[in-house]
Image (cartoon, rainbow, N blue to C red):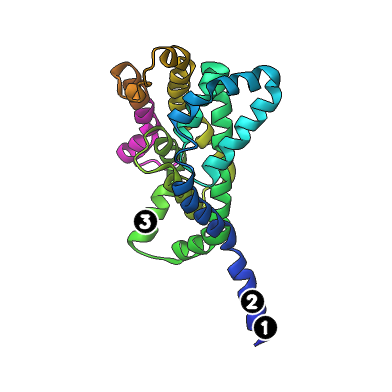
Amino acid sequence: MSDMTQETKPGALRYLPMIAILVVAAVGAFTLRDYISFDALRDNREALIALRDANFILTVFGFVAAYIVIVAFSLPGALIATLTGGFLFGTVGGSALSVTGATIGATVIFLAARFGLGERLKERMDASQGTVRKIREGLDENQWSMLFFLRLVPVVPFFVANLIPAFLAVPVHRYVISTFLGIIPGSLVYSSVGAGLGTVFEQGESPDLGIIFEPHILLPILGLSALSLLPVLIKAVTGRKDL
């Protein structure tokens, strides 16, 4: 009996990080909506600028830390955080800090999911046959392409896109690199919007968050997405597996 208890406890502990993330995400979804919003940014913009000017380094680290928490616990407000980064640090600086925070936060989710479920699911998929095994093999052969595609084109929620690679046993370095590079285009777009919020606030208007769908912005992103899938298409046409 004691042996069974000893074996059960470590197994249960594996799920604690993911459970903690889900609980905090659920609580945050209901309690933080009014605190991480465009209105909150507008109302506190002078205090944020004063903090940045008084202690730039502290503001930088505080911003990145806040972004990590938002992404790691899937809290609402990642878009507002990106706008805030652009508003405080400019397009390039804000984007660099947002991408850094988002990548670290996404890696936290990735590792929590892998620790709790990833290895066990991988073992089951490796032992499976038929369609499931073919899907797994296909994803293994095209991991880089599929990871970049998931980041460039948000066909699934960001939270889900963080979990899928963990369940498919994607190497950590591959996940981190594809996440970091894949979210740069979108981050640059919204950081540029944030950089122009000073004028927007003065005019009493709201930012155009639909700018990413403008042809001159959307088409290059779609082009990058198509480029990320090019190796998959080449393999399909030529039958090669060594690209």
Q: Which one is in front, 83 or 114?
A: 83
State the CA–CA distance, disc 2 to disc 1.
6 Å
Establish if 97 lies above or below 33: above
Residue situated in front as seen by the camera: 45 or 121: 45
Q: Position of residue 87 (x, y in %)?
A: 52, 19
SS at mark 2? helix
Please say whether residue 132 is visible from this viewpoint.
yes
Which residue is the site of mark 1?
3
Query: Which range of residues does the magenta coloring cover?
Result: 223-243
Judge the density around disc 1: few (<14), some (14-19), many (≥20) Cα neighbours within 10 Å. Answer: few
107, 228: nearer the viewer = 107
Q: In the image, is residue 225 part of the stretch drawn in magenta?
A: yes
Q: Secondary structure at mark 1?
A: helix
The answer to whether residue 106 is seen in the rendering is: no
Discs 2, 1 touching: Cβ within 8 Å:
yes
Q: Residues within 10 Å of mark 2 (few under 14, many from 20)?
A: few
Q: Residue at x 43, y 19 (%)?
A: 193
Count every numbered label the image shows and give the total.
3
Left or right of 206? Residue 32 is: right
Give the percent coordinates (x, y) of residue 43. Answer: 49, 25
The three-letter amino acid code for the residue at tag 2 is Glu
Image location (x, y in percent) of residue 77: 47, 36
* Quadrant the N terminus occupies: bottom right
* Rendered residue at 47%/26% (across/down): 187
Residue 134, numbered label: 3
